Image: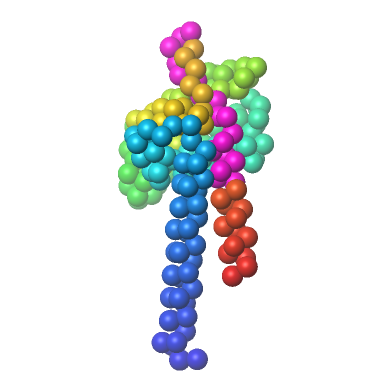
Amino acid sequence: MPADDANRNELALDLTFIETLRRMKARFQLGLLAASASADPGVTLSLRQESCFQLAEFLFALKSYGIGDAETLRRFAELHNQHLLDIRNDRERMQRYGLTPERLDAALFTGDNMSKLLANFSAPQPTIDQSDLARFLVTVMSTETCRKLLLASEQAGFVERIRSPFGAVLITSRGIMEEVYGKTIRETRLEAAQG
């Protein structure tokens, strides 16, 4: 087969894959909007953002990896810390993420932050402090984007935001985002396997 034909075939496969990814994101957005308890245009706009897909992916990963108690969350937080330290120690990689050493350091779970994370997750209703969720998501979104997304997710009925006696905002997922995300991934995987 001539090189031009081989390149055209590869390009056609690449374009098919791009279309699969687009359909996957559209399927996710449609599923999420259908499950939303809010018709507010601002909420709809937030739910259509890439950051919403990333939040759903994170929540899906927590559930799928069986992170359901303080010990597994501690191990996950330690992996998170190591990942951030690896980024901080690689200036080029840190630049690609658009992060600074200070921002990475602020997103580490150490001492009191780790204790707070584990205490909140050990409660009868496991929660994660909104600021801790932003720490986990530091490589994909800002703290403010995370906060705004969680506000919209609460209005949509996907998470519950609980104000603690100490003023922290604690987050618990109702499982809807994870369900929509998982269904979307599975349908896309099966569709791609059928060719």
Q: Residue 139: horizontal and vertical position, in percent?
A: 41, 41
Q: Considering only vertical position in the picture, is 102 above or below 126?
A: below
Q: Residue at x 48, y 58 (%)?
A: 23
In the picture, measured across the screen, residue 157 lies left or right of residue 46, that is: right
Q: Residue 178: horizontal and vertical position, in percent?
A: 57, 39
Outermost residue to the bottom: 2
Q: Which quarter of the figure has residue 188?
A: bottom right
Q: Residue at x 55, y 29 (%)?
A: 173
Residue 145 visible in the current orientation: no
Colour mode of the rendering: rainbow
Q: Residue 90: horizontal and vertical position, in percent?
A: 40, 47
Q: Considering only vertical position in the picture, is 108 above or below 120?
A: below
Q: Which residues are magenta?
A: 165-182
Q: Which quarter of the figure has residue 72?
A: top right
Residue 48 visible in the current orientation: yes
Outermost residue to the top: 165
In the picture, measured across the screen, residue 99 lies left or right of residue 15, that is: left
| Residue 103 forms part of the magenta stretch | no
Q: Residue at x 43, y 70 (%)?
A: 15
Q: Nearer the viewer, residue 110 or 143?
A: 143
Q: Considering only vertical position in the picture, is 17 above or below 177?
A: below
| Residue 170 forms part of the magenta stretch | yes
Q: Residue at x 63, y 68 (%)?
A: 194
Q: Nearer the viewer, residue 3 or 18?
A: 18
Q: Nearer the viewer, residue 134 or 15?
A: 15
Quarter of the figure that contains the C terminus: bottom right
In the picture, measured across the screen, residue 42 lies left or right of residue 156, that is: left
